Amino acid sequence: MRGRSARSAGEASVGAVAWEAAETLTDRAYRELEEEIATLRIPPGTVVSEALLSQRFGLGRTPVREALQRLAREGLVLILPRRGIVVSEIDVAAQLRLLAVRRELERLMARSAAQRAGRDVRMRFREIAAGMDEAARRADDLAFMRLDRMFNLLLLEASGNEFGAAALGLLNGLSRRFWYAHHEQADLPLTARLHAAVARAIAEGDVEAAGAASDRLVGYIQEFARKSIG
């Protein structure tokens, strides 16, 4: 299921949530490289180098190196001494194990965010929910991916639990890439609406609804991952 114009529909949806904080060069390098890997523009198995990535993104080697180190911690790249840097392969069995952990963590974080988020953060969740609804209407995969990243980052911030945030943050990139690799088999509008439901529950401060919506979302993703094995 391909989205409509990656720049028109995608940017229109993401424009509703143009509140991302000012980035450092390392943040920018990480964001752009993570999206390239998660959307398979840099496929699994690709050998990459700091020099080539610096040229590709128009950034210095230091922020690119720091971004690669972060991506290595998240399992998206492998840094092999004397052999180089390789984008990791996609492992379905590992993804199912990851999702079992993610289900528990994400429920905890969604409930915490619903309880603790301040007024401005709740407004940002409302904007994400509206953007997800638009992505669902347009079946826009790129807009969905960008909104999903915003949702994930905001959830980590809003939960007020640095230990949960550190653990869940390690899982997000692999989850995004797996979804994109198999997304033509998925119901993108449903996936976007399930994200919107979690965001709205958090925005409303409904702790029970946020936990239940999170379980429905990850439950669908688990079902989708199991089907991908076949």
Image (cartoon, rainbow, N blue to C red):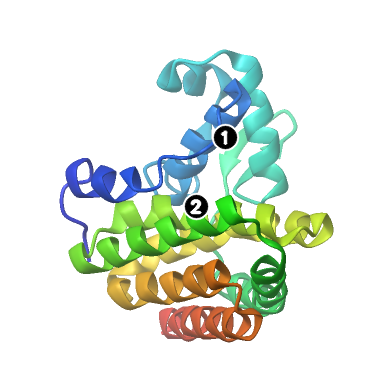
Task: Find residue 137 and report its horizontal and vertical position in percent.
Answer: 21, 68
Q: Are marks 2 and 1 in contact (CB under 8 Å)?
A: no
Is residue 108 shown left or right of residue 216?
Answer: right
- Residue at horizontal 22 percent and vertical 65 percent from the top: 139
Residue 60, image quadrant: top right
Residue indicated by mark 1: 30
Q: Say what secondary structure mark 2 lies in.
A: helix
Task: Find residue 213 and report its horizontal and vertical position in percent.
Answer: 53, 82
40 in relation to 29, above or below: below
Residue indicated by mark 2: 149
Q: Residues within 10 Å of mark 2 (few under 14, many from 20)?
A: some
Task: Find residue 45 and report its horizontal and vertical position in percent.
Answer: 50, 46
Marks 2 and 1, the one that precedes in the sequence? 1
Is residue 143 shown left or right of residue 228?
Answer: left
Q: Residues within 10 Å of mark 1 (few under 14, many from 20)?
A: many
Nearer-the-camera pick, 230 or 20: 20
Quarter of the rendering occupied by the C terminus: bottom left
Is residue 27 shown left or right of residue 79?
Answer: left
Query: Which residue, as the protein is rendered here, is positioned at the far right?
Result: 163
- Residue at horizontal 61 percent and vertical 34 percent from the top: 85
Looking at the rendered image, the disc whose residue lies closer to the viewer, 2 or 1, is 2
Task: Find residue 104 and report its horizontal and vertical position in percent.
Answer: 71, 79
Instruction: Identify residue type, mark 2.
Output: Arg
Give the distance between the C-alpha atoms of the residues marked 2 and 1, in whole angstroms.
12 Å
230 in relation to 25, above or below: below
Nearer-the-camera pick, 148 or 47: 148
